[in-house]
Image (spheres, rainbow, N blue to C red):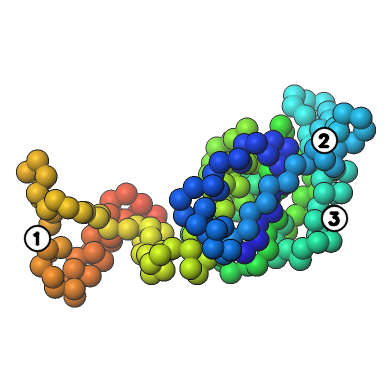
Amino acid sequence: MKIDILSAVPDLLSGPFDHSILQRARERGLLNVNVIDLRQYGLGKHKQIDDYQYGGGAGMVMMAEPLFNAIAELKGETAYDEIIYFTPDGEKLTQSVANRLSLCRNLLCICGHYKGIDQRIRDHMVTMEISIGDYVLSGGELAAAVLVDSVGRLIPGVLNDETSALFDSFQDNILAPPVYTRPADFNGWKVPEILLSGNDGAIEQWREEEAIRRTKSRRPDLLDKA
């Protein structure tokens, strides 16, 4: 999979993809992440990419022309399955959205800044808008990093045990059950006996029951969707 990220502040993404699972995915050639500096498409001597908003109001807006030129050039090189813009009023990033995007070959992510981007780019060039939560960030770079991580780990071959992702929270709208590791008794806090029994069927049933119990307690809204 190839993911291109168009950013006004590319240095904000200088570290998230260089470690752990995503690093291995890139080294194996399973994931290609490119961060592109929008300012190389900026206008005039000072490479301007933002301007005052029509109608007045506080905050600058990222201009249409630099974004148009950047997207048009990138589209000439890559056939994107989706051109994604991160915005609080977009579709919420859920596990099902990540699952769907993991089947794509090429994604282009646009990171907004200031008061956002000119609406005409959203209307005519963006194909998908995503929100990672009901809050506002200074820019879309952190949202892009979240998307790359949530999608990249689902690519076949990225995780050492590919079945691991199938049992993550939010798969089938159920939270994951509690997990334990050695020692079996720490400070008098003991691992549930069923997990030490070696009875795979009973363990699987316990995990399913615990997942449902945890979901009922912490996110009952998910059960309505399950």
Q: Residue furthest right?
A: 44
Left or right: 84 in relation to 54: left
Whether tag 2 and tag 3 are in contact, CB under 8 A, the answer is no
Q: SS at mark 1?
A: helix
Instruction: Identify whether 23 is placed above or below 49.
Output: below
Whether tag 1 and tag 3 are in contact, CB under 8 A, the answer is no
In which quadrant will I find the N terminus? Answer: bottom right
Answer few, some or many: residues within 10 Å of disc 2's Cα (few below 14, many 20 plus, some between 14 and 19).
many
Whether tag 1 and tag 2 are in contact, CB under 8 A, the answer is no
Residue tagged by mark 3?
Answer: 72
Label 1 sits on what residue type?
A: Glu
Q: Is residue 14 visible from the viewing direction of this image?
A: yes
Residue 4 in the image, given as x and y percentages of width and height:
69, 54
Q: CA distance from mark 1 to mark 2?
A: 61 Å
Q: Is residue 98 visible from the viewing direction of this image?
A: no
Instruction: Identify whether 208 is placed above or below 220.
Output: below
Residue tagged by mark 1?
Answer: 193
Q: Give me the disc on residue 49.
A: 2
Based on the displayed image, in which of its 4 quarters is residue 15 positioned? top right
Left or right: 214 in relation to 19: left
Q: CA distance from mark 2 to mark 3?
A: 16 Å
